[in-house]
Amino acid sequence: MDASVVVVGAGPAGLMLAGELRLAGIGVTVLERHPERTGESRGIGLTIGTMEVFDQRGLLRRLGAYDTATMGHFGGVPIDMTVLGAAHEAAKTVPQSVTEEALEAWAGELGADIRRGHEFVAYEDTGDGVTVTVRHPGGQERIEARYLVGCDGGRSAVRKAAGFDFPGTAATTEMLLADLRGVELEPRMTGEHLTGGFVMVARLAGGIHRVIVGEHGVEPRRRTGPPEFAEVADVWKRLTGDDISHAEPVWVSAFGNAARQAGEYRRGRVLLAGDSAHVHLPAGGQGMNTSLQDSYNLGWKLAAVLRGDAPEELLDTYHSERHPVGRSLLANTRAQSLLVLGGEEAQPLRDVLTELIRYPDVARHLAAKVSGLDIRYDVDGGPGPLLGRRMPHLPVTTDSGSTSSTALLRAGRGVLLDLDDNAVLRRRAQPWRARVDIVTATAHTASAQGPLAGTAAVLLRPDGYVAWAAPGSHQNLTTALTRWFGPAGQRR
């Protein structure tokens, strides 16, 4: 067998998945049809949830210098994101090209086989694996693997080859985007509604400005390639009265408000992640960030099954956990589409939301939604407020010195964090010590408040979600360990 997993697509989702698999010691081959990185930066920021994910894997340092933002928006209506009280702020000046470069370097250093100029053609399910046909400059070859994962975008060839359905709604309008040099524009980070349309401006690194424009009532065109910059400049002038035609276009694109989601994220030995599984209006960069977190959820589960630690049924939780997240994503981006792209008829809705968002509970709810912090997986139904949620950043002290719940996840393993020096608890977890790090620690007093108040121990999955807590869980620790890390003892 050539690799345990073949991943199609070297975008953010594919590279994140490759890194996660290699961190767990799983062989992975990534196929990318483009011979070189395109340098295109569809996404230009990382949400708070993704910043936490990157911190858990020690990836933030690879991004270089970046600016952060305390303000976000929902459909162009500003939100003060500090209402979340999170350990991180969103990164607003990290182009997708930088994210991809960082992830590719990480995955490559871990030993991922990344093959550019290799195009997925077809696959065959062999019962205990898959055989993937690939086209490259030297001809065609066949690669054998245990699983195939499509991370190849909204027009996914893997999704089509495997027969996944992709229901949803077609685009009813479109927006134009251009990254420009040689022009100075005032930032409009949350966008601005003008008579006739919507405009947005973001300053990127290297003196580049990103402009996004959309005219009300304009149906999407059938395009065979990106729009000409002259089209963007014409719309900009009609909406703002300003002339940007003298600027140098670095990248020009168009996108619509289509909303589609695969009916299932797994069909046997084929799985989908990222835009292969869901497409929508790119409101607030949620698409790329949700894609990264799809792979973060899938990687450790696929690795556990391939190592023989856990039964194949663990992979079913990828669909049951991430499909509702994708469904919620489509709902909130469709709502934002009405706010952003709607004409004067949508102004009363924008006014009402502007009033509501002044209430802290409303602001907190919407801020968490667009940040990826509203997710709660079904882990056992217990009353504990942490169960099924991301573990908050918790500074702790161990016998080895100061560390944190975030740093303890760097190795991509499960963590039993004993905050009460409970020898009985640690003894119960011993049969899983090859898969779960057992850590006795003392939480810093100021950090052990809020949702952590009174918590004696937590079991963290490799993706940083709380699988069990004492008190708060209905099930016992042994049941939780078995559910998420497989039966005790030797690997199968």
Image: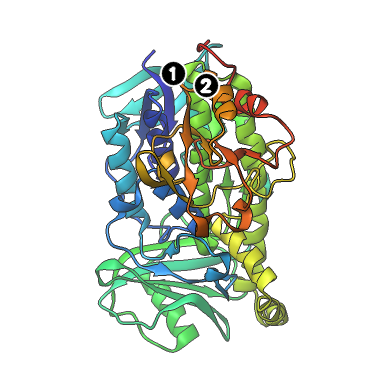
Q: Secondary structure at mark 1?
A: strand
The residue furthest bottom is 241
Q: Nearer the viewer, mark 1 or mark 2?
A: 2
Q: Is residue 96 above or below residue 411?
A: below
Q: Position of residue 154 (x, y in %)?
A: 52, 46
Q: Is residue 279 above or below residue 473?
A: below
The structure residue drawn at horizontal position 45% and vertical position 32%, both measured from the top left corner, is 413
Horizontal arrangement in the rendering, residue 420 relative to residue 288 (left or right): right
Name the mark on residue 81: none
Of residue 92 and residue 163, the one placed in the foreground of this image is: 92
Binning the other alpha carbons within 10 Å of mark 2 as few (below 14), some (14 to 19) or many (20 upward) gives some
Horizontal arrangement in the rendering, residue 59 relative to residue 272 (left or right): left
- Res 477 → quadrant: top right
Residue linked to disc 2: 430
Name the mark on residue 145: 1
Binning the other alpha carbons within 10 Å of mark 1 as few (below 14), some (14 to 19) or many (20 upward) gives many
Of residue 381 and residue 275, the one placed in the foreground of this image is: 381
Q: Secondary structure at mark 2?
A: helix
Q: Please, which colouring scheme is shown?
A: rainbow
Which comes before the other along the chain, label 1 or label 2? 1
The structure residue drawn at horizontal position 54% and vertical position 27%, both measured from the top left corner, is 426
- Res 141 → quadrant: top left
Amino acid of disc 2: Gln
Amino acid of disc 1: Ala
Of residue 192 and residue 469, the one placed in the foreground of this image is: 469
Q: Position of residue 266 (x, y in %)?
A: 60, 30
The quarter of the image holding the N terminus is top left
Q: Is residue 432 above or below residue 167?
A: above
